[in-house]
Image: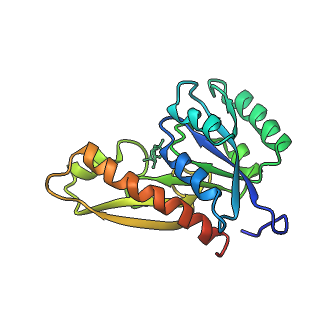
Amino acid sequence: MVLSTGHNRVRTAVFISGTGSNLKSLAIFSKTKISPISINFIVSNNSKAKGLNYAKKFKIKKKVLSFKNKKLSENKLLSILKKNNIEMICLAGFMKILSKNFIKKFKGKILNIHPSLLPKYKGLNTHQRVLNNKEKYSGCTVHFVNARLDSGKIILQKKVRISKKDTETSLAKKILAQEHKLYPKAILKVFNL
Ligand code: GRF
């Protein structure tokens, strides 16, 4: 990706649905000297998302949109993002699927983090499926978003070893800790930094 505005940081929105621990790690990263992005907007489909609290903490604007009527919510969102000069989107635990039309408007500018070694284990309940299949490794992936779920070009992955004692909860925790490091690294890579 090319930095479009000289030395200014690329204005980025983070989309969440829940805890927002990846949002937190991105917000912290965005304040570092080396970050090519600033986080200027938080979007959630869930008004009860804990991650929305980071809006106040990091002084970031926020917007909740139900996505019950996807087309309406997306159109509203597109105009809000435009008004706020948002150039890039990081999905971080966002549980809604964006339409082709929306993705087209931000072509090549939407990233997602997924808690598996894609292309394996796309979709939900990743950790349980991984454990059921007695995999030795799992991990996390940051990828570009295209119109097919969890299928865009892979930017970076981190492998995590699964121990015999791992449960869905312990594996999720182990992988999440790696996600927090991987997302900022993937952003640096996207900007060739
Ligand atoms: C992460 O495991 C992410 O990979 C997945 O949803 C989880 C979100 O966690 N898509 P958080 O809200 O960032 O804490």
Q: How many marks?
A: 0
Q: Position of residue 125 (x, y in %)?
A: 35, 42
> Can residue 108 be seen here?
no
Is 139 positioned to the left or the right of 68 in the image?
left
Residue shown at the point (58%, 33%) measured from the top left: 52
Residue shown at the point (33%, 48%) measured from the top left: 172
Vertical order, 78 against 30 (above or below): above
Residue shown at the point (28%, 51%) measured from the top left: 171
Q: Position of residue 173 (x, y in %)?
A: 33, 48
Instruction: Give 127 or 122, whichever is nearer the viewer.
Output: 127
Examine the image and state in which quarter residue 177 appears: bottom left
Vertical order, 177 against 74 (above or below): below
Is 40 positioned to the left or the right of 136 in the image?
right
Q: Position of residue 124 (x, y in %)?
A: 40, 42
Is 81 positioned to the left or the right of 144 in the image?
right
> Can residue 29 be seen here?
yes
Question: Where, quadrant-wise, is the C terminus in this rendering?
Answer: bottom right
Q: How does the figure colour the protein chain or chains?
A: rainbow
Q: Position of residue 90 (x, y in %)?
A: 62, 51
For this orientation, the residue located farthest to the bottom is 192
Is 91 positioned to the left or the right of 59 in the image?
left
Instruction: Give 35 or 182, whichever is nearer the viewer.
Output: 35
Residue shown at the point (77%, 53%) measured from the top left: 87
Instruction: Give 68 or 25, whichever is nearer the viewer.
Output: 25
Examine the image and state in which quarter residue 83 appears: top right
Question: Where, quadrant-wise, is the N terminus in this rendering?
Answer: bottom right
For this orientation, the residue located farthest to the left is 164
Examine the image and state in which quarter residue 119 appears: bottom left
